[in-house]
Amino acid sequence: MTMKLYVGNLAFSTSSQDLQELFATAGTVESASVVE
């Protein structure tokens, strides 16, 4: 099952790698994107 999660109010310095590392503690992260 595919799930998408929107996270707002991130610091401008937040990277896709930061998100992957953070959410990996909750399960497998297939991809993470930061929209600038």
Image (cartoon, helix red, strand yellow):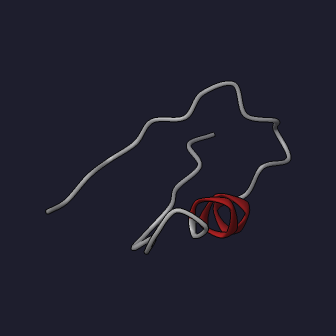
Which of the 4 quarters of the picture holds residue 18? bottom right
Which is nearer the eye, 26 or 34? 26
Q: Position of residue 26 (x, y in %)?
A: 52, 62
Residue at the far left: name it.
Answer: 1
**Residue at (85%, 47%) from the top-left corner?**
13
Q: Position of residue 29 (x, y in %)?
A: 45, 70
The residue lying at 43 percent from left, 74 percent from top is 28
Nearest the eye: 17 or 22: 22
Going by the picture, which residue comes out furthest to the front? 26
Tell me which residue sits at (19%, 59%) in the image: 2
Count of labels in the image? 0
Quadrant into which the N terminus falls: bottom left
Q: In the image, 3: left or right of 32?
A: left
**Depth check: 1 or 19 in front?**
1
Position above or below: 34 against 12: below
Q: Is residue 29 left or right of residue 34?
A: left
Q: Would residue 25 appear left or right of 30 to someone viewing this image?
A: right
Check the image and name the residue furthest to the top.
Answer: 9
Quadrant containing the C terminus is top right
At horizontal 68% and vertical 69% (from top left) the residue drawn is 21
Residue 15, image x, y percentages = 73, 57
Question: x%, y% of residue 20?
Answer: 60, 67
Which quadrant of the view contains residue 5? top left
23 vs 4: above or below: below
Q: Nearer the viewer, residue 33 or 20?
A: 20
